[in-house]
Structures are given as structure tokens and as C-alpha cells.
Amino acid sequence: MAFGKGMGMGMGMGMGHGMGMGMGMGHGMGQPDFANPDAGIPPHNSLMPRSYYATPHELRRRPWTLKFSPDNTGAVSFPSDYRIDPNRPGNEKFAQWTEQDWDPALRFWTRDFDPTLIEWLKAAEPAEPSIVAALEFADQYDLWHPIHVKYAGLGGLEWIEQSDLLWYLEEKIPGTWPAPDADPATWPTPEANDRWVWINAELEQLADYMSEERLDYLDESDVQADHLHEYVIQFVGANQRDHPWTMELINCGLAIGNLVYMSYKAEFNRVRPSLICPGLIPPFGPPMHPAFPSGHSFLAHFLALLLLEVPYIHQRLGVDRSGALQPAEGSVFNIPEWSDLRGSAAIKSPLLLLAQRIAVNRERIGVHYPSDSSASRHLAAGIWDMIVPDPVGRGNIYNQMDDGSGNIIRKQSISCPMFDLILKRAKAEWP
């Protein structure tokens, strides 16, 4: 049985629906059946299939022995200490992901956003409920697209946080701003030469992951490259027979998520870690689109948040509010609030901890910086807060207000009637 038919541009993930029907994500790059050499439709009539989110076939997975003891000349196995500061004069070519670096089939993301999704829909089935929901979402791009939504406190909805942007801060985002859980005076405002401090610290973390953890997590990371949703499905215990609308809810998360994170990638154009630290060579890839924010982190956290809207699921896998430092025995688990995903602390929720594991696996294989993962966690919370039908939001202090009569209401929301219907039906499938 084949699972998925490609949808979107640049996703490589699909989920079965019935007998091979359903929605996957990818424009030729997504390969639901990786054993099939004919899977995928590469651009420019190439005979080489694609996988791993638009990764060229030539950059497919290869074994690298992660042994870090010096060789007989005293040289280390991986030159992770050799790093390029992209902010220094002469290194401009390493400072930003350029249009020619994109996979040819994904370059439409570098153009002005098209709310009718003409290019994006070329490999999709417009009648699928999840695709209808994505079209409803896309039509309101003024409420979520980075060219319209201010981030990091500049009068916006406080999605991407300042700590996610220390590698990037410059003229575009001057000054400091308050955060709900920190004194703004504690945050630095880096100059161009200071940004390297934050970038280098992230590279150091990735070098540690590579030497200490990558080998243990490599097979898991390999499967999650194109099939992270399968880990989420297995964790919640869903199946197509008993939970078809829950599966469609996951499809919605994949489709809407693709629109969000690819739009933000095109806005920030961050280079992959291995470009400026060659010793962080990934075992496959890296994918041919920018690093920031992480698509895997966004999807994992967004899918988790959507599924935790189902009462049965959040009562089993939701947030522990016992206040204990460690999970308390017999705890009652709750639906998440927006503030649960603020900052960088571990979220006391089994399902959201799985999302974080998936995100960090992308760091372990060297294709994302920690701030890519963190920004996506915060961005996913922001989109969830806007799209889920709830008159007051989920604790987002920046997206609620007094209506003048003492009633707290939501400032803004994204209206997707098809998504609302899918969510309602998904809730009804569980006890």
C-alpha cells in the first residue's frame, strides 16, 4: 500500500488516507516509498529522486564514523573548530541564503506570497479537507505572514522571541523590548561583531551533539526527516480506521505548517550550520532551503498543540500543572496555554516533550541551530493561538483585550471554518 500523494512544495511527508488516498507534502521531493527508485518527481526532468525535504540525491545519507580521537598526525577526525564568521568583511557570501541556493522547485517561496497558492497547489488535491483549510488560512496571510506580522515585541503578537534572534539582530530590529517573563534590561542588543558570539555558541552546541549523541539518534532522525508525523501518530495511539478525522487534523497541521514556516524561512534566509562550520557535515543533506525557523520543530510542536485540543488526548498527554519540579504521580493533565511554550524551559507535557525531541534531533544531525528550533516552538504557539476557535485565546497576553465591558476577548484570530469542522470531528472520535 502506498501512503500519500505529494502536496505542497518542500515537505517530503505524507500520510495515508484510505487506500493510498490522502495528503503528503512535497513537490517531487517527498518520497513516501523510499525503497522505490522511481519515487519523486525531481525538477528539470532529472532522473535522480529526491528525499529529505528537497535534498538532492547526491547528498543522500552516507555513513560517517563519528570517532573523534586524533589520527597519527594529531589531527581531529572532524574539523569542527574551523568556523567562518559571516559578519566579517570578505565573508558576505556566507551571510545569507540566496535565491540560487534554493531547490529549483521551491524558489517560488522567494517571490511575493500568493494567497491563492497557485504554485503550491500544483501537486495537491484541492478538494481534500486539509487543503481547503490551508486555502482558508492562506487567504488571511495579513494575520500571520512575516511581511505583515511584527515579531519580537514591535507592536506584534509576540511570536518569535528576542532570544531566538540574537544571531540576527541588526538594523531591522533595533533596541530592546520587554518579554512577559524577563526584564528587558537583561537582554543585550548585539552589534554586528557581537552576533558572532551567539552564532559561535550555537555551533559549539551542535559540535557537542555531533560527537556525543548523533550516532545514538541517527536512525530515529533519519526516519523523522520525512515522516515525523508518524512518531506523533504512534505516540497518541491514533489509527486510520478509528480516527480518520484525527488523521485529517494532522494533515491540516502539515499543510498549514508548510505555508507558515516556508514563508518565514524566505524572510530570514539563514544559512545552514555546515556552511559556516564545515566539520558539522550532516549525514544527509542539508535541505536546499534556509535554516530559520526549523520546519520540523514547527510541525512537531504545532501538531502536538492541535492534538491536545482533543479532551481525551490532553487528559493523557497534556500539561502537568501540579507545580512539582518533577512530574507528580496522579497528576491531572491540562490543555496547554500560550505561556507554556514561552522561553526555553522544558514543557511539562509528554506530547510536547516528544515535539522537542523531534526538534533537537534536527540539531543532532547538524542541519539546524538551537535557535531555529526555539523560534519554531514559539511560532507554532502563536499560530495555534490564532487559529484554534476560542474567544479569549490560550493565555496569550498580547492577543487579548478588554472589550470595554469587562469582558476579555481575543484581539485577532484566523478564521478557518473547514479547520474548525475537522477539529470538531476529531474530538468526537475519542472517548
Image (cartoon, rainbow, N blue to C red):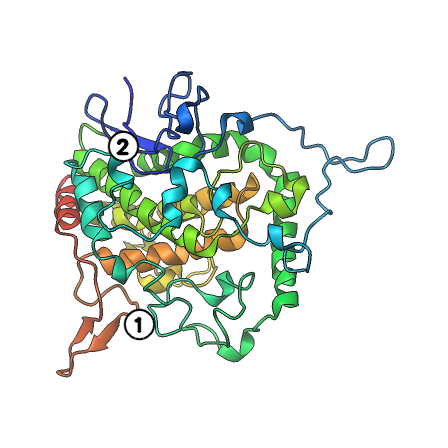
> What is the x, y in percent for residue 362?
50, 42
Residue 201: which quarter of the image? bottom right
Residue at disc 1, secondary structure = loop
Residue sitting at x 50%, y 77%: 175
Residue 430 appears in the figure: no
Residue sitting at x 24%, y 72%: 400
> What is the x, y in percent for residue 339?
36, 65
56 vs 139: above or below = above
Residue at disc 2, secondary structure = helix
The amino acid type, in three-letter code, at marker 2 is: Ala
In which quadrant of the rendered image does the N terminus lie?
top left
In which quadrant of the rendered image does the C terminus lie?
top left
Q: Name the foreground residue: 239 vs 51.
A: 51
Horizontally, residue 251 falls left or right of residue 51, namely left
Residue 11: which quarter of the image? top left
Horizontally, residue 293 falls left or right of residue 214, namely left
For label 2, the residue is 123
For label 1, the residue is 397
> What is the x, y in percent for residue 7?
28, 34
Could you tell which of marks 1 and 2 lies nearer the N-terminus? 2
